[in-house]
Image (cartoon, grey):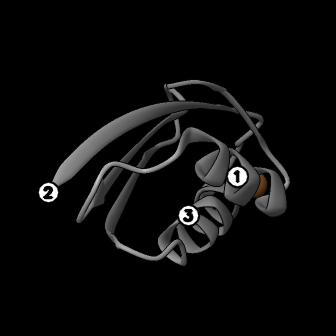
Amino acid sequence: MATTTYQVQGMTCGHCANSVSSEVGAIPGVSDVQVDLASGQVTVTSSSPLDTDTVRAAVDEAGYDLVGA
Ligand SMILES: [Cu+2]
């Protein structure tokens, strides 16, 4: 199991959090996504370490920016 916290910019409400959470949650191997709206932190639990570019693409697909990992 790997847990990584990413910094995501642009989320403003529960809908944003849900979008990010469902896109990131669709990445193969991801078992849990926790979004902290106030801080913009997204904590992802996966069976093996994820490629940051894969996570960035999913966050981008949801309409937000991954600014740090
Ligand atoms: Cu929103």
Secondary structure found at label 1: helix
The quadrant where residue 18 appears: bottom right
Does 9 sit left or right of 50 as displayed? right
| Label 1 beta carbon within 8 A of ligand 1 | no
How many badges with numbers are in the image? 3
Give residue 31's mark: none
| Label 3 beta carbon within 8 A of ligand 1 | no
Residue shown at 59%/50% (left/top)?
55
Secondary structure found at label 2: loop
For the residues labelled 3 and 1, say whether their Cβ atoms are less than 8 Å apart: yes
- Which of marks 2 and 1 precedes in the sequence? 2
Give residue 1's mark: 2
In whole angstroms, how far apart are the C-alphas of marks 2 and 3?
16 Å
In whole angstroms, how far apart are the C-alphas of marks 3 and 1?
7 Å
The quadrant where residue 10 appears: top right
The amino acid pointed to by label 3 is: Val
Q: Position of residue 20 (x, y in %)?
A: 63, 59
The amino acid pointed to by label 2 is: Met
Task: Kindly give the residue lying farthest to the left in the view shown.
Answer: 1
Nearer to the camera, 8 or 31: 31
